[in-house]
Image (cartoon, coloured by chain):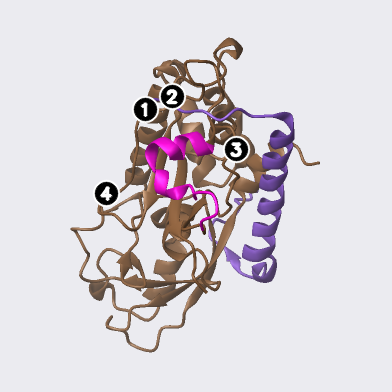
Amino acid sequence: MADDKDVLRDVWFGRIPTCFTLNQDEVTEREAEPYYLLLPRVSYLTLVTDKVKKHFLKVMKQEDMEEMWFEYEGTPLKWHYPIGVLFDLHASNTVLPWSITVHFKNFPDRDLLRCPSHSVIEAHFMSSIKEADALKHKSQVVNDMQKKDHKQLWMGLQNDKFDQFWAMNRKLMEYPTEEGGFRYIPFRIYQTMSDRPFIQKLFRPVSPEGNTHTLGSLLKEMYPAAIPNEGQQKRYQVVIHGIEPLLETPLQWLSEHLSHPDNFLHICIVPTPTD
Amino acid sequence: QSMSLSVTPAQTTAWRRQIFEQLSERTKKEMDNFRHYEQAIEKTVWVKKGTM
């Protein structure tokens, strides 16, 4: 059987085949060909799409290009969510490649944060790591790191360097054996059926009685509708990194192995396809 | 109020196996037919040039 460490590699090297098409209302000098890319699930759209911008720059005038943003079937895509989360939330169960529309005009300020440079992504990423460590270790691990260690985490993600990232990230995944896990599990539960961006509350990996908390126990408390009643059809899929872990999976294990590089466990709840 | 489900050894095997199997299926579905696509992040290759 595969080793738990293999899971970390599978998570890191997950890719979404994507077709970028220019929005038809953009002003071009000639027809824009679509552009195909393998996007890392654990990265951010605005971090890995410089090539897309360069591609469309060939058929557009610089003055017609404002800030680039992305849309899938009418939904503006939030760059500050990991790519895999955007795909699982909005496009799981659809035919690949994922078809994303590229815009250079009419930036939807009500829906999206602006992303003028990669340093904005870095700030967002590091702030998530710090928030996660505040939950896991009262910020002790991240505060004990040096600036170069923080940079190593970021550069690992930016340059897709698994070993560089994990040499540092493993420190953020440690915990005292006697405690059975982190202080709290950094998680976010996303759904498209609500105006609320996501659910995030305090939840421990072990109950006060010493029982292991599982994905099922988290959902029972945070989103009970996601757990099918006996004999009833499953209404929702609970998706993490494109897979549906069993509800019996221990939450601490999930946090250590299926968290994104920002150290949060991102859980998507999507309606079960009806076909 | 916290709720918990106890984890038995048999379930442990089942949940772990399920994750390995699904990740492998995910790779097949999302990557096997698209390996000819360009990677979004190029791996940097450093070439050190010496002076003659």
C-alpha distance separating marks 3 and 4 = 27 Å
**Viewer-proximal residue among A47 and A249:** A249
User: Both on one chain, marks 4 and 1?
Assistant: yes
Read off the residue under disc 4.
A196
Colour chain B appears in:
purple
Q: Relative to A191, is B15 on the left or the right?
A: right
Q: Residue at x 36, y 29 (%)?
A: A131
Subunit that carries the residue with mark 4: A
C-alpha distance separating marks 3 and 2 = 19 Å
Q: Is A227 colored magenta in this rendering?
A: yes
Q: Residue at x 55, y 29 (%)?
A: A252
Q: Nearer the viewer, mark 3 or mark 4?
A: 3
Mark 4 vs 1, N-terminal side? 4
For the residue marked with disc 3, what is the amino acid?
Glu
Mark 3 vs 2, N-terminal side? 2
Q: Position of residue A15 (x, y in %)?
A: 58, 58
Read off the residue under disc 1.
A202
Read off the residue under disc 3.
A248
- The stretch of residues the image draws in magenta is A215-232
User: Both on one chain, marks 3 and 4?
Assistant: yes
For the residue marked with disc 1, what is the amino acid?
Leu
- Dominant SS type (magenta): helix
User: Both on one chain, marks 3 and 2?
Assistant: yes
Please tell me whether residue B20 is drawn above or below residue A274 in the rendered image.
above
Colour chain A appears in:
brown
Q: Are marks 4 and 2 in contact (CB under 8 Å)?
A: no
